[in-house]
Amino acid sequence: MKSAKRTLDILALMTSREARMSFTEISVALDLPRSSLHGLLSTLLESGWLTYEPASRTYGLGIRTLEAGNAYLRTDDLPSRARPFMERIRDDLDETVQLSVLDGRFNVYVAKVDGQQALVLASAVGRRLPAHATGVGKVLLADLDRATLDRLFSRVTLEQYTPNTVTGKADLYRRLQSIRDDGYGTDEEEYTAGVRCVAVPIRDQRGQVVAAMSVSVPVIRFDGQIEARARALLLEAAAGLSAALGYQRTPMSIGGG
């Protein structure tokens, strides 16, 4: 059990990084004994889950991780069910539309459609980003209760990517409450300078948020008209996709008197 847990920890670490890692970096990050780590890395290399580059003496993800990711997308029909809604938004705005799910305190992109603009968002399906710094991430976090949020962010320092990134938990919690009140969230150049996003929640038959959909626009094209249109299209798509997933919104009761 201990070896299995350590193996999964190595894979989780590697998928959370956007660069290859040395043996020492992996050992320090996971606080693993060097003797144990040698055996675990050898097993992962032999099975194709990791690769090794002798010149830099670093490890990276192997082809098996791509196969696993593609298998996930084939077996989870959420991206395929979302794609027609995403394409309609893309065709209207000619901007990037993305779908993301929550993984701990991170959001992972599971679908993406691009417009034909010369300047577009550089992102990819499978990318994993800290949820507090993205529009879709904050929308996903907003559905969690306070106890769950406290567990996720206990002893965590919120990474800062731009001057606009939320780095205080109290501020983050206030923004999550605003998302609950408004029904949508935004990214005001919080992860990438020069890019703004609008995001909305996707709900399942239980009413739980299972994904978030966003429109990302470079600030040079993001004006009040685009923001309002993106928000309206996203809310319409979210209602349609959520209904397709079995969500039934409870009608508001009207009191007399």
Image (spheres, rainbow, N blue to C red):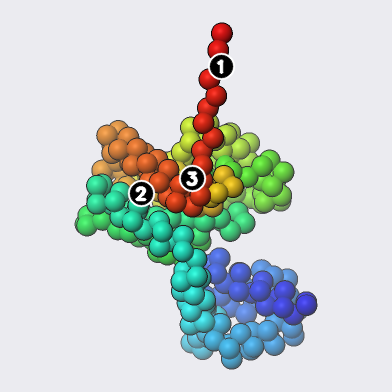
Mark 3 or mark 2: whose residue is earlier in sequence: 3
Q: How crowded is mark 2: few (under 14 residues within 10 Å), some or many (20 or more)?
A: many
- Amino acid type at circle 2 is Ser
Q: Quadrant of residue 250?
A: top right
- Amino acid type at circle 3 is Pro
Mark number displayed over residue 216: 2
* 222 relative to 49, above or below: above
Q: Which circle, 3 or 1, is nearer the viewer?
A: 1
Q: Name the residue under label 1.
A: 255
Q: Which circle, 3 or 2, is nearer the viewer?
A: 3
Residue at the far right: name it. Answer: 1
Quarter of the image where the N terminus is located: bottom right
What separation in Å lies between label 3 and label 2 (alpha carbons)? 15 Å
Q: Name the residue under label 3.
A: 201
Secondary structure beneath label 3: strand
Is residue 184 visible in the rendered structure shown here?
A: yes
